[in-house]
Amino acid sequence: MRLLVVEDEVKTCAYLRKGLTEEGFVVDTAATGVDGLHLAITGDYDVVILDIMLPGASGWQVLEALRRQKQTPVVFLTARDEVANRVRGLELGADDYLVKPFAFAELVARVRTVLRRGAWREPDVLQVGTWSWTCFGAVRAEARRE
């Protein structure tokens, strides 16, 4: 699994890269919002771990721009612990939100949980004659006659 960590604090970024690599992930990093957004859009990542307070572009801006082009899962990892910030992050499209300081084991568990969910995608439509089925993964299907 390939992760992108967008974090401007050098020690935190190195800690995350080392720990996540030891957990079996391939980890790329970016130290600015602009670089993080570029990598997230041009790369093929399974999860982006994103700080909010970044130079160049905030994590909010990165997430908004990313959501216009891709549905890559995003986990905010930030010192901004106010409820309003957590709500904003989730409403902008983040898949999870973890506050610093954090337990590394919890971050790994949250990343794995997001990976189990998979990225959102458009439902598949199967057309046979006058019948069509809209399939929402293995959870539910709706059939209708045209």
Image (cartoon, rainbow, N blue to C red):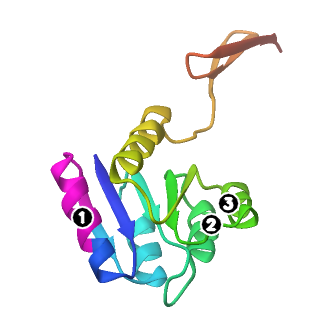
Q: Secondary structure at mark 1?
A: helix
Dot 3 or dot 2, earlier in sequence: 2
Asked if the residues shown at circle 1 and circle 3 are in contact, with their CB atoms under 8 angstroms apart, the answer is no
- Are there few (<14), some (14-19), or many (20+) residues within 10 Å of tag 3? some
- Label 3 vs label 2: CA separation? 7 Å
What is the number of the mark on residue 69?
none
The majority secondary structure of the magenta stretch comes to helix
Q: Mark 1 or 3 closer to N-term?
A: 1
Question: Which labelled disc corresponds to residue 86?
Answer: 3
Which amino acid does the dot numbered 2 rest on?
Asp
Residue under circle 1?
17
Instruction: Using the numbered discs, state the Cα–Cα distance from disc 2 to disc 1 in whole angstroms.
Output: 23 Å
Name the amino acid type tagged 3: Arg
Report the magenta residues as a range.
14-27
- Does residue 43 appear anywhere in the picture? no
**Element type where label 2 sits in the image:** loop
Task: Tell me the residue at 34%/46% (across/down).
Answer: 105
Pick the residue in front: 10 or 120.
Answer: 10
Figure quadrant of the N terminus: top left
Q: Amino acid at mark 1?
A: Arg
